[in-house]
Image (spheres, grey):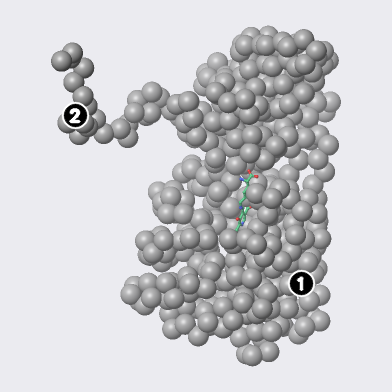
Amino acid sequence: MTTDQNLPLKKILPLSSSTTIDGTLTIGDCSTRDLADKFGTPLYIYDAKTLRSQASEYIKAFNAKWPYGVEIHYASKAWINVPMAQFLAGEGLSFDVVSGGEMAVLRVAGVDVSHSAFHGNNKTADELREALENKFGQIVINSVDEIDLLDSISADLGIIPRVLLRISPSVDAHTHAATTTGLVDSKFGVAIENNEAYNACIKINEANHLDFRGIHMHLGSPIFGLEPYIAGVKVGAQLIKQLSDIGILISDFSPGGGFAVAYTDSDNPPAPSAYASAICETLAEQADLLSFPPPRLIIEPGRSLVARAGVALYSVGSRKEIPGIRTYVAVDGGMSDNIRPAIYGSKYEVMAAERPFDPAQETVTIAGKFCESGDVLARDVKLPILKRDELVAIPAAGAYQLAMESNYNLALKPAVIMVEDGKAYVIRRRETYDDLTSLDVTNQIGPLISSTESP
Ligand code: LLP
């Protein structure tokens, strides 16, 4: 293996990326060609080194700037499964979960959830019960009606959970409309307007079976600027001050997640330390100005912990040239494993994984294999002339791709591996045709099926 500093897209590829002597992209010292031969494509590859480095960067950056207690909760929705949960817990992370399903994965993984949080805008009574029974560290209440629901479930179970209120602070995160969450017209959080959030905090504080700990907000995702966090923290601080004036002291504060990552060479997101400085300095300044004790800080990065660690590897298939219009090159995955370009117009870079140094010869659109024209992974990217069966790699593939995958066209969900020091560890096997039919109940429909014999 070489450690080529000139490797194109190095900035967005996993930290351990390099090339073999013959120029094939390697991740964790594993040749992408060897990985494709062994595990097939599409293949999702997570680099353990990048995951470790991102986790420790967040832990260090926030602890260095906030001596009053910090918890880093990985937003599991970015992608989780049992081995990934075990790996990330081993790196010192707690979790943010939003469903009974995510809780179940953590339960099977056997990780400690006493510092993890249960979120969601429509938690069911069953899910709330599961969260209490599983001893989740916090429940983040999202709406006024959830206060009574949780209070009565807690009373039933004889448990007094620690509770935060998610507020909607009316701060524009300047991100995609589908992933903006902090504005007044949002299904998330109790509005700061008209003292709604303030009154909800009082209601939680007065509830008999809830231990009111603090406030939470999540402004959207990805947020490339620091200003939305600064504005959000200031709104939160005003509320903390209002509450402390009536004797309600807040011990926990969370500005959520949403920290951006580079998907393309031209993206320049702030470093974790820059987000940490903006958040911690504003909170410290506000605590001083408004005279409230600095609360514990809870941070919820999802994408920024896992996106760069992941690479999606595909094999090239058919090619369609439309003279003067566009050339489509299709790969063996697409919107079933990465729906983000189709629904958000997300941009990705593409690399010819077996010859990353070859000069670009043409502009092509990398299409998927699914029956929709919108199934495109990258539009108008410059690449060498790709041949059938060669490999292409899409970097920054670790977040919200597998998390939003589907079986559209009954595609088989790809295998997922983790790599380090020349070894590949399967963390999810590829789906099989048997898996596809495994939920089908075939012994009951008989009476409904018309006879195929002619009358
Ligand atoms: N905390 C809360 C309460 C959230 O709702 C989210 C994401 C996060 C933390 C983590 O945000 P992150 O650090 O990963 O940006 N499917 C979209 C992203 C939706 C994010 C939803 N909430 C995408 O593919 O971009």
Foreground pick, 106 / 333: 333
Q: Is residue 243 above or below residue 385?
A: below
Q: Residue at x 75, y 59 (%)?
A: 172
Pointer 1 residue? 234
Q: Does any atom of ligand 1 lie closer than 8 Å to the CB of label 2?
A: no
Q: Residue at x 50, y 34 (%)?
A: 406
Q: Is residue 396 above or below residue 186?
A: above
Q: How far, Cα to Cα, is label 1 from label 2?
A: 63 Å
Residue 343, position as x, y percentages in the image = 63, 39
Pointer 2 residue? 446
What is the tally of numbered marks visible in this picture? Answer: 2
Q: Is residue 79 above or below residue 291?
A: above
Foreground pick, 321 / 132: 321
Seen from this angle, which residue lies furthest bottom? 246
Residue 246, position as x, y percentages in the image = 64, 90
Q: Residue at x 66, y 28 (%)?
A: 377
Kind of element beneath mark 2:
helix
Which of the 4 image quarters holds residue 153? Answer: bottom left
